[in-house]
Image (cartoon, rainbow, N blue to C red):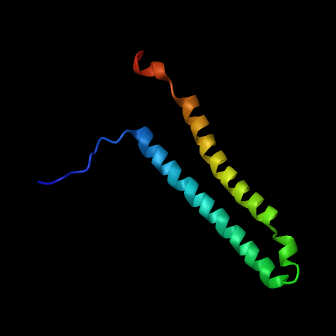
Amino acid sequence: MGDRQPTNIPPALAIFAYQFSVTFGYVQCVMNLVIATNRFIAVCYPLRYKSIFNKTVCVSVALNVAMQGVLCISLYFSECLCLWDPFSTFFF
């Protein structure tokens, strides 16, 4: 009939793909918030913009957002590993 997509995707892989996409969605929303704050300061405080948003602040905000994304995905993995019992497949 043609090429068919596999239907036997492991649940762990499906959950990982879901969490991966949710994490990037979260990071995108936080980055949009940071950009909105940046534009707000640029419009409301144009003379002090360079002193408020200097290179150090921009780098620290970007690193903070990246670390929040890593924390979000690491919390998922810690919960997943705590619930995983390797002996449950051998001993019913």
Farthest-out residue, left: 1
Residue 13 placed where, x, y %? Answer: 42, 42
Residue at the spot 56% in from the left edge and 57% down from the top edge: 24
Instruction: Tell me if 29 is positioned left or right of 22 in this view.
Output: right
In the foreground, 59 or 1: 59
Quarter of the image for residue 26 reads bottom right
Residue 2 placed where, x, y %? Answer: 14, 54
Farthest-out residue, front: 55
Relative to 57, does residue 70 appear above or below in the rendering? above
Farthest-out residue, top: 91
Residue at the spot 82% in from the left edge and 69% down from the top edge: 54
Residue 91 placed where, x, y %? Answer: 42, 15
Quarter of the image for residue 9 reads top left
Instruction: Tell me if 66 is positioned left or right of 55 in this view.
Output: left
The C terminus is located in which quarter? Answer: top left
Instruction: Tell me if 35 is positioned left or right of 7 in this view.
Output: right
Numbered disc total: 0
Residue at the spot 30% in from the left edge and 41% down from the top edge: 8
Relative to 4, does residue 34 appear above or below in the rendering? below
The N terminus is located in which quarter? Answer: bottom left
Residue at the spot 60% in from the left edge and 63% down from the top edge: 28
